[in-house]
Amino acid sequence: MIKFTKMEGLGNDYIYVNADLYPIENPAEFSIRWSKPHTGIGSDGLILISRGRDADFSMRIFNADGTEALMCGNGSRCVGKYVYDHRLTEKTEIDLDTLSGIKHISLHPDANGEVHRATVDMGSPILSNTLQVGTHDGTLNGQVLKAGGKELTGTYVCMGNPHVVIFVDDVRQVPLEEYGPLIEFSPLFPERTNVEFVEVQAGGILRMRVWERGSGITQACGTGACATAVAAFLTGRAGRTSLVRMDGGDLEIEYSEASGRVLMTGPAETTFEGELP
């Protein structure tokens, strides 16, 4: 039997397994099977946690369609909570090895010593990559995209995985289920892409809805929130600090002027635990 923990950060929910105790040879297959909402556990994917070689811990992320993701911001916060709650570490400052590099997690225990919030140093954004963007210089900064017969203006930001951020007047009117897959699989993005539609609201709140590469519409996306904050700063829509509001809740994002790195702070919660054959 494999013991698992279902966790969520702003509704971005994954199945977490200690891969040191329960090695899974075919995680893509299990992610597809377990992620199904009616015949499985139901989730956005599967995250495997193990001891790290060059960091305290490492994680591998498999989307609901079985593809392996490079990074997940909400998942990183939950990994921090997982290793702390399961007494795999007593540290509140943790280095986590991911396919997009080592990320630093700062846990914020409350007065009872329980962790419900964490900050992740997401590193510096990448604004040019010819492998991910099919333009001559690998950039996309306020350029026109075509989807569903409409012209949309997008900005590319990579936060360990590729994102295209599209600012709109009213995010509620965007048919995300239509535009999301059209942009994700657009020839402009050879490795596919995550898609964020964003409305700048009163008080500078960035109201975001997301279509995640390999998972579809989700409640929240940590790397997407970081990409949104960076794109808003680059296009003059926000300052260095932003509140990104998603269907699942809010994330606080700081794009540091001193270091050029992005800090993401938000919740991490355990939903339930169980075991499967």
Image (cartoon, rainbow, N blue to C red):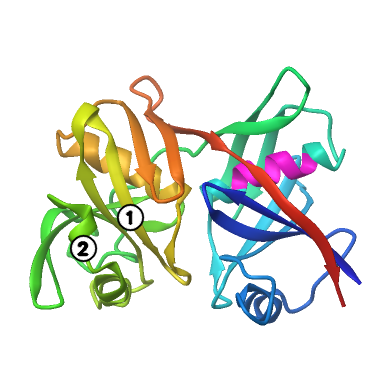
Q: State which region is magenta.
A: 76-83
Front residue (pair 18, 52): 18
Question: Mark 2 falls on what kind of element?
Answer: loop
Q: What residue type is labelled 1?
A: Arg
Question: Can residue 18 be seen from the camera position used here?
Answer: no
First in residue order: circle 1 vs circle 2: 2
Front residue (pair 84, 156): 84
Q: As displayed, is residue 29 above or below residue 239?
A: below
> In the picture, residue 92 is in which quadrant?
top right
Q: Mark 1 points at which residue?
A: 209
Label 1 crowd (10 A; few <14 / some 14-19 / many >=20): many
Question: CA–CA distance between discs 1 and 2?
Answer: 9 Å
Q: Is residue 81 magenta?
A: yes
Residue drawn 38% across the image and 47% down it = 246
| x then y, percent, for residue 61 | 62, 62
Question: Mark 1 falls on what kind of element?
Answer: strand
> In the picture, residue 60 is in which quadrant?
bottom right
- 107 lies left or right of 140: right
Residue drawn 37% across the image and 58% down it = 162
Residue drawn 77% across the image and 47% down it = 53
Q: Which amino acid does label 2 sit on?
A: Val
